[in-house]
Amino acid sequence: QVQLVESGGGLVQAGGSLRLSCVASGNIFMMTTMGWYRPGPGEQRDLVATFTSGGTTNYADSVKGRFTISRDNAKNTVYLQMNSLQPEDTAVYYCKAARESGLAKYTYWGQGTQVTVSS
């Protein structure tokens, strides 16, 4: 079982920056993908930024050029640097980790951290 704990959320004015952190209880290099998500229009959580174990990163179009995902394997931590924040970025941000072992797939979620951007 892997536990993910997010931190770094808060209240910021439009144009400001925040850095989110996600600390994993296990080794993140074992994960197939790790990333950040936020609630979408429906029940789902939409991708914000992810990276794969092969080093490929993927960003939502709405955050490209403003957000950067990174990781520190030694600290088992994934970061999301958010710059030029806009009110529409207001959301609870969730860290997700996924791992595959043979045919089995495991998905882990953190509890979320609130980001509020004021205009």
Image (tube, rainbow, N blue to C red):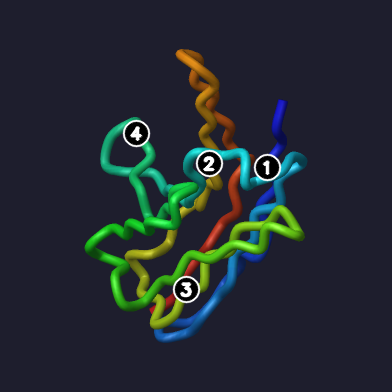
- Pointer 4 residue: 44
- The one nearer the camera, 17 or 59, is 59
Q: Are marks 3 and 4 in contact (CB under 8 Å)?
A: no
How far apart are the two marked residues, 4 and 2, measured between alpha carbons? 13 Å
- How busy is the neighbourhood of tag 1: few (under 14 within 10 Å), some, or many (20 plus)? many
**Residue assigned mark 3:** 82
Decide if residue 72 is on the left or right side of residue 18.
right
Please report contact status of discs 4 and 2: CB closer than 8 Å, yes or no. Answer: no
In this rendered view, identify the residue nearer to me: 10 or 60: 60
The quadrant of the rendering that contains the N terminus is top right
Q: Residue 4, which numbered label?
A: 1
- Asked if labels 2 and 1 touch by Cβ distance under 8 angstroms, the answer is yes
Which amino acid, mark 4? Gln
What residue lies at 22% left-to-right and 62% top-to-bottom?
Answer: 61
How far apart marks 1 and 3 lie (CA) works out to 19 Å
* Left or right: 106 in relation to 39: right
**Dot 2 corresponds to which residue?**
96
Residue type at the position of mark 2: Lys
How far is the residue under mark 3 from the one under mark 4?
A: 22 Å
